[in-house]
Amino acid sequence: MVLNWEKCHFMVQEGIVLDHKISARGIDVDQAKIDVIEKLPPPINVKGIQSFLGHVGFYRRFIKDFSRIVRPLSNLLNKDVVFKLDEECLTGFQTLKTSVVSAPIIVAPDWSKKFELMCDVRDYAVGVALG
């Protein structure tokens, strides 16, 4: 195993790992990415929708009801659909921008406490929750 010293940082209080800001407070989104998304104008074509969804899709785990909010925008990507950015699409666009900018911080669990692992297994999926 070989380390690249230019990419190694030791004894730091916080840092960016896989576009997430890791600190003692928890896991947060990278502010540089947030600034880019905050300044984006509404998309005017399919390529713009794809680009926007690519940016915000990275933060989907931070956004509650992401799939419900993004549905009107993703419907514009279907074949044989006329591109029409209606009020529902603009509302989804603004909601996603606001959600990414004001994303909550995810805090790592307190490993000194006991946990309960709840599992649900179906014929087609497995669900697990840590309580």
Image (cartoon, rainbow, N blue to C red):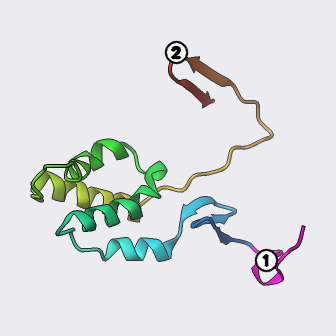
Indicate the quadrant where residue 95 lies: bottom left
Q: Residues within 10 Å of mark 1 (few under 14, many from 20)?
A: few
Q: Residues within 10 Å of mark 2 (few under 14, many from 20)?
A: few
Q: Residue under circle 1? A: 9
Query: Residue placed at 56% from the left, 62% from the top?
Result: 28
Left or right of 120, for residue 66: left
The x, y position of residue 129, in whole percent, is 59, 29
Mark carried by residue 129: none
Query: Residue placed at 39% from the left, 76% from the top?
Result: 36
Q: Residue under circle 2? A: 123
Task: Relative to 114, say whether 77 is above or below.
Answer: below
Q: What are the residue bounds of the magenta stretch? A: 1-12
Q: Amino acid at mark 1?
A: His
Left or right of 27, for residue 101: left
Indicate the quadrant where residue 42 lies: bottom left
The x, y position of residue 65, in whole percent, is 36, 42
Task: Relative to 129, say whether 57 is above or below.
Answer: below
**SS for callout 2:** loop
